Image (cartoon, rainbow, N blue to C red):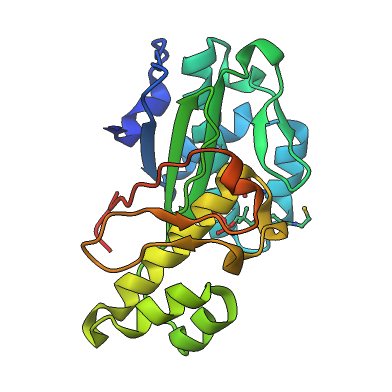
Amino acid sequence: MAERGSSLAFSTNHLDLAADVVDLWKTWLDLPTDKCANFFQTLSDDERERAERFHFPKDRGRFVVGRGFLRALLARYVDVPPGEVCFRYGRCGKPELAVAEQLGIQFNVSHSHGLAVYALTRQRAVGIDVECIRHIPDMELLAERFFAVPEVTALRSVAREKLAEAFFNCWTRKEATVKACGDGLTLPLDSFTVSLAPGEPARLLSAGPTSLGASRWQLEGLTLAPG
Ligand SMILES: CC(C)(COP(=O)(O)OP(=O)(O)OC[C@H]1O[C@@H](n2cnc3c(N)ncnc32)[C@H](O)[C@@H]1OP(=O)(O)O)[C@@H](O)C(=O)NCCC(=O)NCCS
C-alpha cells in the first residue's frame, strides 16, 4: 500500500503500478483560487457544467480540485496530458477510463469533509470510501435500517465510547465494497456482512446471495487522516 501526499498533482513523471499493489493518494480539497483555476483548465465540458451546477462556491471548488487532481493523477499512470484523460461511466455511475488500452488502470475516488482519497490498481476492481468520524444522531437506528443483522448485533456489543468508530468502520467497509463492484445502491447494504469492531481486521465476512461471492475480495481499514 503506497501512500502519497498532494504535491503530486504538479509533477508529470510517469508512475508505474505493479499488479499486486494498490496506490493510495490523498489531497485536501480547499486549495487557493489559482490552484483551483489550474485544475479547472483540465476539466472536460461536462465536468465544467457539473461544477457550475454547485450552488456553494466551496462545494464547486472542492469538486473542481477533486476531479482535477484525479485527472493529474491518472495522466501520470497512462501518459497523456490531464486534459486528455477520458472517462466513461458504468450503469450506476462508476467512472472508469474510456480508452481500452488504458483500462488496465482501475481507480476509485471518495471524498468527505474536504478530504479526497484515491485508490488505483492494475486489472483489479477497487472501491474506496472515506468518512469523517462524527456524531450522527440515531446511529443504532441507521444501523438497523442499513446494516446486516450480524453487523447490528456486533455493533451492540461494542463499548459506548467506541460506537462511532465501529459504526464508521462498518459504513466505509460496506460503501467501499459496493463501490468496488460498481453496483451502487442496487446492491442492498444488508445483503453482505463486514467486520466492524475497533482493532479487528477489516474483512468481508459473508457475501450472502450477492454477485460479490463470485470474486475474492480483500478489505483494508485505513486511517488516511486523523478522525
Ligand atoms: C457511489 C456511491 C456509493 C457514492 O457514495 P458517496 O459516499 O456519496 O460518495 P463518495 O465520496 O464515497 O464517492 C463519490 C465518488 O464515487 C465515484 N462513483 C460514482 N458512482 C459510483 C459507483 N456506482 N460505484 C463506485 N464509485 C462511484 C465517483 O468518482 C464519485 O466522485 P465524484 O462525485 O467526484 O465524481 C453512491 O453515490 C451510489 O451508490 N451511487 C450509485 C447510485 C445508484 O445506485 N443508482 C441506482 C441505479 S444504478
Q: In which quadrant of the rendered image does the C terminus lie?
A: bottom left
**205 left or right of 214?**
left
Choose top left, top right, bottom left or bottom right for residue 207.
Answer: bottom right
Q: Which residue does the image show at 72% across and 45% down from the upper left?
A: 93
Image label count: 0
Q: Which residue does the image show at 48% across and 16% down from the upper left?
A: 77
Q: In which quadrant of the rendered image does the N terminus lie?
A: top left
Q: Which residue does the image show at 57% across and 14% down from the upper left?
A: 81
Image height of 169 relative to 61, above or below: below
**37 left or right of 97?**
left
**Foreground: 167 or 40?**
167
**73 left or right of 48?**
left
**Foreground: 96 or 152?**
152
Asked whether residue 132 is in view, the answer is no
Give x and y (percent) for residue 112. Answer: 46, 58
Give x and y (percent) for residue 206. Answer: 49, 57
**185 left or right of 118?**
right
Asked whether residue 172 is in view, the answer is yes
**Foreground: 103 or 26?**
103
Choose top left, top right, bottom left or bottom right for residue 16.
Answer: top left
Image height of 151 relative to 43, above or below: below
Give x and y (percent) for residue 137. Answer: 45, 88
Q: Which residue does the image show at 68% across and 49% down from the upper left?
A: 183
Image height of 108 relative to 57, above or below: above
Give x and y (percent) for residue 92. Answer: 74, 48
